[in-house]
Amino acid sequence: MSEYKDATQAIHAGIQQTNEQENSEAIFMTSSFAYSSAEEAAAMFGGEMDGNVYSRFTNPTVALFEKRLAALEKGEAAIATSSGMAALMTLAYTLLKSGDRVVCSRNIFGSSIKFFDTYTTKFGIDVVYVDATDYAGWESLVDDKTRLCYFETPSNPLYEVVDVQRVADICHAKSALLCVDTVVATPALQNPLTQGADIVMQSATKFIDGQGRCLGGALIANQALIDEFTGFMRSAGPAMSPFNAWNLVNSLETLALRMQAHSANAMKLAQWLESHPKVAKVNYGGLKSHKYHELAKRQQKDFGGLLSFVVEGGREAAWKVINGTKLMSITGNLGDTKTLVTHPATTTHGRLSAEQKEKAGIAEGLVRVSVGLEDIEDIINDLKTGLDTL
């Protein structure tokens, strides 16, 4: 369906109508598939015939989500996983072996740092960290042993924006692969595969689902890499459930519209926060004052629904602001229709050491807001109530 625009592909890509002639996407809630003969079963299990084998790695509903997401990401193929962290596990355990190096931005999700430091290093993999926008640092750390480079853009929660093509060129000069996590932007706002990345990682749990209903993750890349990831999926099994895939397929239909609305609300909230006397700093790429505003404008279609801000007074002040809100949900998730608020230093990045938090810029006075789709005046008034407690 490459002849169609993104909005059309978000609704139609990957559809295969069954004999029931349904107009809405079917859901195939089955663990296994039956065959007309032992010969047919052997041919499908052996890869000699196309067809479904077992829902751990082949399911029609999951395949529909994969095809639709790949179309929106401008990638050849995708593989869906049970969560965003399952996608990271699939990425690492498929591509890496003892002696390889991984170069990561230190401004990535706290659980991702914990995964790399705890569960990859014990297999003899060298994991090193760099400030994501320190391009000289990337140059110095990406060496001949580097297999994978990884960063978020925009990053959560500080909205750090990385020049994808610039880092891709550094990686490719050493034959390393670049994976970009673009969960904050989603394919509605950014397509890193068109900007030099080899792999895109998504936590579909966030804005892709958009309503806080289910978990999901995905990797999008060329077909050869997806085939490698599928081999790991077949053996290890971090698979997306058909029900979650069905939810996410339907969510993709409205993703672009929702991201426009999230972006509009977040921009108004960021501008209001920037003028508030009790706010020391606002992190949002849509603000002209933001360090990475021009790069964000160049790489993204819009700025998305995630922002953070800093208040003086550390943890006590941040908690006062959060506890003073009434409309917002206090939760570590992001990407919901509801506005969500959290204290990153004690939730999403709470497992990091004090030194790791300091290096990643996760201050005790930092408050993160995933801006929802409520009326913006109600969102602003709710945060005003919280800030008035200081």
Image (cartoon, rainbow, N blue to C red):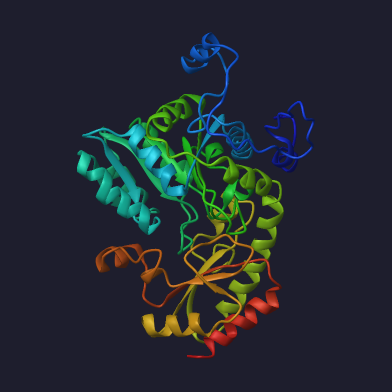
Q: Quadrant of residue 35?
A: top right
Q: Position of residue 93 (x, y in %)?
A: 33, 36
Residue 132 x %, y %: 38, 53
Could you tell me which residue is drawn at 36 percent across and 66 percent down? 361
Whether residue 103 appears in this view of the structure is yes
Q: Is residue 170 visible?
A: no
- Front in this rendered view, residue 8 or 337: 337
Task: Provide residue 89's location: percent of width, then percent of height.
Answer: 37, 42
User: On screen, 10 above or below 305?
Assistant: above
Q: Nearer the viewer, residue 65 or 129?
A: 65
Horizontally, residue 89 falls left or right of residue 377, namely left
Percent position (x, y) of residue 372? Answer: 63, 66
320 in relation to 238, above or below: below
**Count of labels shown?**
0
Residue lying furthest top: 39
Indicate the quadrant where residue 210 lies.
bottom right
Residue furthest out toward the bottom: 389
- Residue depicted at 48% across the width and 33% down the height: 56
The answer to which of 38 and 172 lies nearer the viewer is: 38
Side of 74 where 114 appears, left or right: left
Query: Residue, x 37% and y 68% (percent of image)?
Result: 362
The N terminus appears in which quarter of the rendering? top right
Picture layout, residue 356 above or below residue 168? below
Is 141 on the left or on the right of 89, as rendered? Answer: left
